[in-house]
Image (cartoon, coloured by chain):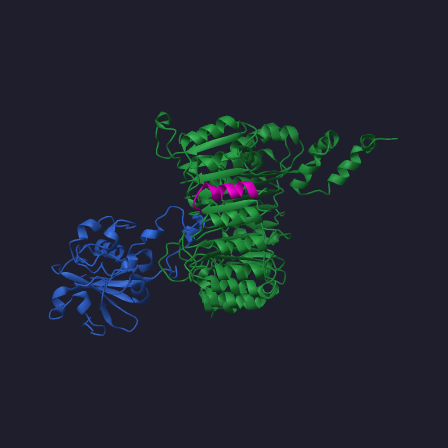
Amino acid sequence: MAKYSSLGLETELTLALPGGGGGGDPSGSMETKQKKRVFFEFSGEESKVVSKNQVVGWPPVCSYRRKNSFSGEERTKMYVKVSMDGAPFLRKIDLSAHEGYSGLIMALEKLFGCYGIGEGDNNEYVPIYEDKDGDWMLVGDVPWQMFSGSCKRLRIMKRLDAKGIKLHAKDLLKGISIEA
Amino acid sequence: MHSFQSMLNYFPEEVLEHVFDFLTSHRDRNAVSLVCKSWYAVERFSREKVFVGNCYAISPERLIARFPRFRSLTLKGKPHFADFNLVPNDWGGYVQPWIESIVRGGVNLEELRLKRMLVSDESLELLATFFPNFKSLVLVSCEGFTTDGLAAIASNCRFLRELDLQENEVEDRRGQWLSCFPDSCTSLVSLNFTCLKGEVNLASLERLVARCRNLRSLRVNNAVPLDALQRILAQAPQLVDLGTGSFVHDPDTESYNKLETSMQKCTSITSLSGFLDVSARCLPAVYPICGQLTSLNLSYAPGIYSDELVKLICYCNRLERLLVLDTIGDKGLGVVASSCKELQELRVFLSDVYGIGNTAVTEEGLVAISAGCPKLNSILYFCQQMTNEALIMVAKNCPNFIRFRLCTLNPTVPDAITMQPLDEGFGAIVKSCKDLKRLSISGLLTDQVFLYIGRYAKQLEMLSIAFAGDSDKGMLCVLNGCKKLKKLEIRDCPFGNVALLADMGKYETMRSLWMSSCEVTFGACKTLARKMPRLNVEIINENDQIEASFDDKQKVEKMYLYRTLVGPRKDAPGFVWTL
């Protein structure tokens, strides 16, 4: 499986996170996910702190401005509906409140109590989303910023409903619509 | 034949005092008081405004003893690098002892301006209680107080003219502080609460604005929505300085149309800021006043991209001061260069502090501005890359820089084209800009740049250096050459003991020196402290190591030294050790 990480890591194939999963990761439980499903691997932007920017106090921006800064996108709230197959009602989640896929997955797991949706092929559920074009996409293929900018709604789908369709990240082609 | 001295004796004191009244600059007054004893005496009784650049350089008691009639005090606390998390929060800079002394000293305080100080609610309550003529409170980059303290000020200061809060960390207590201004308060001229996070009672705000007919400057916070702003503007068309709150609304509504109308009537607004929360579609509402603006601050608005910024700015032909984010891009700066011929000050901040995105400006934008804006004299520029050629061109186009602060995202990035250090570029700047007072350099820099600075930057008062230089020679050039240097702050440079100790007397001519992550050792700091009793040499050590374990040869992580007339301070926390 190819690594698309932009951080210049070795080419040896591992299931480790880019940047070693150390700096700037808010979830804290990343170590346990290292051996599992790899769709976190491709989004290098998830780790907020690129190694050369880890110098304390650089760039010299005062803390007041840092708090008002952001990571490149609009700061307005982005609430999207989330449905889960089998659940009686939908929920809403604010995409702008998360810095990356790990935060999102954790939030979804908390909302529906469906742990493990981010992991491996063994899990019963898989998260998908409807993008601007109306197509249903697998969560995790594209960089976080691109995803959060184009996601209109989320669905936690039963894996069984997608039988016959290979759900490896790099195999899923854009435009295949999965019946909602 | 009378001597000059006896002629001076015939000069009545009242006349001297009257003449000194025309001297407002504290530097002029300081100079005047050195002429002779009688001038010193007249000046000290007539001084109304006192400026203390370092609150630990003097004690409030001595200040009151010398200037018993002062009414306005400006105090600065933490060193500048505290802004970038290099100084622990509780390092010091408490205003409480100052206020207590001023109360005890019977001073008729009317104005207090604080920067980087720790202010408590108790301090604000003292101000509100003991100074019946208190008129003006300006707090910049301070912390430690809550909206309860503001409520005390609002409730009790009957003649309050100015309450200006800039970039402070204020805890919100949800106590409706703004509603505490009594109905009898009509004296406000300036109110700025942009940095507050909490809600204010909008009806109270509108009534306050309505009854303060002298209100010239109003900057609200994000919790004040656009329709409330419209009602406020309708009541206060005389405003000169406006800071908007939330600027998000559906433009197809009556509220928005009313805003456009009210905005058009505000023909006196020359300064515009705010936009912390902004939707680009609402910006056209401010187009009618763009032509009258001399100051525009859009640096808190990451949601506006280059195209929309440019649409706004191209109407601002009288602009003298512009603060933006780097979302403006090089092209956008090109538009600024062709539209804003009166521009004097430009600040381009980072929109993306964590370095993920690609929005940034380069040397092209800077060159364009320098070519189009001949009056430019002050710049703060965060950029992705820089070249010597660009800096040389900028130096040629704009020889009038007083402040030149450049910050490259990568602190040691070389010239983007030649891969050489940026020594020649900055050298051109200091050579050309003979009035340069403040300089911040960054990028790949060797000792050569310091040679240039020492040789040419004769008016330089403040210098900020990071990740630059090769040896002690660099720092020595600066200390020897920059005769007017007041503040020197250095981080992560290979400057050590030889440079530190070469001219110890120099530090008494300066306000302060900061050195962190350099090559200076504990032993050298001790030597300096021993030989110079009128300096406080502070070692800031956050690792809680016991003092005894400090070896003389050990490098010091953070050192801050400053001249003082009152010896080591008594409020230093455990991790600060004054040698």
| Residue B115 visible in the displayed image | no
Q: Residue furthest right?
A: B1
Main SS, magenta region, reads helix
Q: Colour of chain A?
A: blue
Viewer-closest of B180 and A160: A160
Residue B255 vertical placement versus B549 (above, below): below
- In the rendering, at what x and y percent does residue A20 appear? 23, 51
Residue A158 vertical placement versus B185 (above, below): below
- In the rendering, at what x and y percent does residue B382 appear? 46, 56
Viewer-closest of A80 and A9: A9
B294 to the left or right of A152: right
Q: Is residue B431 magenta?
A: no
Viewer-closest of B228 and B46: B46
Query: Magenta segment range?
Result: B469-481
* Residue at 86% over, 31% down: B2
- In the rendering, at what x and y percent does residue B542 appear? 37, 35
Q: Is residue B471 magenta?
A: yes
Q: On the rendered image, what quadrant is the C terminus of chain B found in? A: top left
- In the rendering, at what x and y percent does residue A161 appear? 13, 68
Among the chains pictured, the one given green colouring is: B
A25 to the left or right of A125: right
Residue A7: quarter of image = bottom left
Residue B414: quarter of image = bottom left
| Residue B512 visible in the displayed image | yes
Q: On the rendered image, what quadrant is the N terminus of chain B found in? A: top right
For the image shown, how many numbered marks are present on the structure?
0
